[in-house]
Amino acid sequence: MLYAKSNPVESIKQHTKELLKNLEILKQTYGDEIEQKQNLEKERFWELLKIIGTYHDIGKVYTPFQNEIRKSMSLGKIETEFNYQEIKHEQLSPLFIPNQKFELSKEEKKLVYQAVFYHHERKNSQIDENLVQEIIDKDILPRIKEIENELKIEMNQHPKKVYINKVREIERITKKEKFYKEYCLLKGLLHRLDHSSSAHIAIENPEKQNLSELTQEFMKEAGFELNNLQKFTRDNHENNLVVIGSTGIGKTEAALLWSKSSKTFFTLPIRISINAIFDRINTKIGYKDVGLLHSTALDYLEEKQEFENEESIYEQTRNLSKRVTTCTIDQIFPFVFKYRGYEKMYATLSYSKVIIDEVQAYSPEIVAIILKGLEMIHEIGGKFMIMTATLPRIYKEKLEQMGINFQHEKFIKNTKRHKIKLEEKEIQEDLAKIIERGKAQKVLVIVNTVDKAIDLYCKMIEQKANVKVLHSRFIQKDRNEKENEIKDFSKSIKENGIWITTQIVEASLDIDFDTLYTEISTLDSLFQRMGRCYRNREYNKRENNIYIYTKNPTGVGESNVYNDEIVRKSMHMLQNYNEKVLEEEEKILLVDELYSEKNLEGTKFLQQFRDSMEVLNNIIDYDIDKKKAQKLLRNIENITVIPKRIYEENIKIFEQYEKEKDCKNRNKLKREIKKLTTTISKKKARILKEYISEIPYLKGKSDIMCIDLKYDKGSGLILEKDKAYELEERFCD
């Protein structure tokens, strides 16, 4: 038997059969959508994909490769006179394809050969022509009939090394070539077919449950009628959309109505919001072909205890098999960097819809990546919908400059929700007022940095206030609890008190407080913060319910959270609305004006956006791998740490991890360890390096470090070593 792999044991014939079965599922499920995306005659496209799928792994018949598999299976070695020399199986596979039988044209040969040759992207794909010829003469030709008989497919009876001329790095198919889209589709779908078949997962679900219809049924049962926004998205499901809608207007349902029964990727900036959307689709609406994809998705699925096999759901989602995937953008948009293997995601997006929620929440560099991605998605035939409460004008204008057709509409509530007061002082100067307001109301305090949030929390605790804090410097386990806690607090009719947070609550978190106290930030950020106060209620009281503190705000300036030029402009534009109700329409107009190219000229913000677009327009194909692409997208400047106290309290998990040999159990323990971690910036890590050390049990196996600084379940990780707050346990539960 000619083996494809040893764990689990599978022959080349079995793997190929599984792959071709998945190809038929793909064609049956999304064939019509895929056929519309390219220049090839539709049946010819599927013929080429079948050829590629049939022959992609045939290079594994190479005797030294078979002997390596047999060795791992404790089977006898196949005797051969050919001396072992390492060569990758995909580098040999093209020579077996019978070109004349399939009547491949010159262009088709290049498409087919490269899709097969590069279906495992290696850092170095150079190939030794003399070695290939030696393998043909000594190992392949003497066995060609034997191979053909076992695999039951027709082989090239006179294999030659000339195919190498069409697969050299210098010959790689890029955007400038006529059949670039076809190549992306063929190679990308081969990746999908190969990975799904190896994992024994159906590549797609052929049962087209209509998400739009289920959403309408859900709304009807809940007593809601479709509003103008939702009717618009439902009726324009075949178009690209850019939609501005007030907070609480039902943008999520509008997006699901637009999705209809298409394959869909629903993105949001933060994990808590993604989890909430997943729950809404899966539990409330009752649509089951939905997956969750982000760095802690499997942990979330396990904690819910609602699924029989969380790992299976997660694996299906990772293999892009779910019809709807809720995810963070770093899971799909790295393809813009054209990393080695990017075609897998790019080909999938060709017949998918992508929803970008709250685009204004991203930095200008990240928005540049998103817009470049939307341009590429548009070019290959996919659809997108941007929905947001406010939209910087330069982003809309950039889409227009790219030549992308889209419909742009605004849907604004007339509800008067926010009466603002600009306070020319620091937020801590009003602690007494905030604490007093928290005795009778639900009060939300939002500051720009974690250190400021901890500082305010500790000061309020000293004054015995009913206060809790949420920020990014809690270990994952505690942060998950706090995220659920703030949502429960918001829904509670009887409970009053204070929550202090950072901007992590801005995007799509369904909470509703009575009063907001916030440091000044940029207008778009401020308006998102306001959306967590009087979310759907009319405000008609005399006193203000939004207080904006403008003196010495944290997180503003060079290398900080917010651009100081944009913050200054935002502050100036708000002056006319001091102690007045700020209408929803005015918010949108203000953001539009703030982020006009004319207003931004000369700012670092605009330069960052332009520079990022310039870099993305000059990407070198296949220059990096996927891991580096994701790192670039996440703009990762953090390190992962476990507070020493947490490490010591959970030492048994680390001991078990070090001893555990079973791969599945090790992965489970690894996820348990990840729940005990948080992150700090590399900049702060350098300052605090004397408090950071390696974890013996993880040495050489993980980049997680131990940090010997105070951690408290109430306040989180305190990085200033002199802040040794002793918090009473009753405030920290």
Image (cartoon, helix red, strand yellow):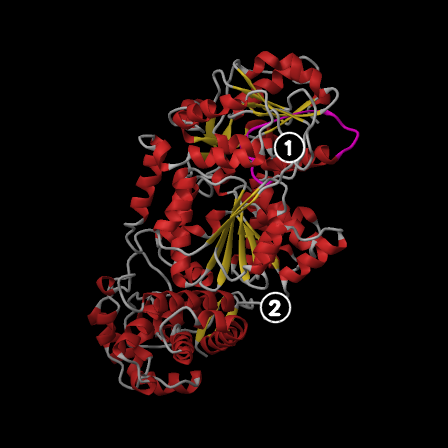
664, 51: nearer the viewer: 51
Give the label on residue 208, or none: 2
476, 485: nearer the viewer: 485
Closer to the N terminus: mark 1 or mark 2? 2
Q: Position of residue 266 (x, y in %)?
A: 54, 52
Residue 499 falls inside the magenta stretch: yes
Determine which quarter of the picture holds residue 205.
bottom right
Q: Residue furthest right?
A: 494
Give the position of the C terminus as an image quadrant.
top right
15, 374: nearer the viewer: 374
Q: Amino acid at mark 1?
A: Lys
Give the label on residue 257, or none: none
Residue at image position (48%, 48%) is 329
Residue 577 falls inside the magenta stretch: no
Residue 171 versus residue 572 in the image, above or below = below
How far separated are the C-alphas under marks 1 and 2? 41 Å
What segment is highlighted magenta in the picture?
A: 492-508
Q: Position of residue 407 (x, y in %)?
A: 48, 54
Q: Position of residue 502 (x, y in %)?
A: 55, 29
Residue 656 versus residue 429 in the image, above or below = below
Residue at image position (50%, 74%) is 27
Which residue bears the numbered disc 1?
A: 416
Q: Are marks 1 and 2 in contact (CB under 8 Å)?
A: no
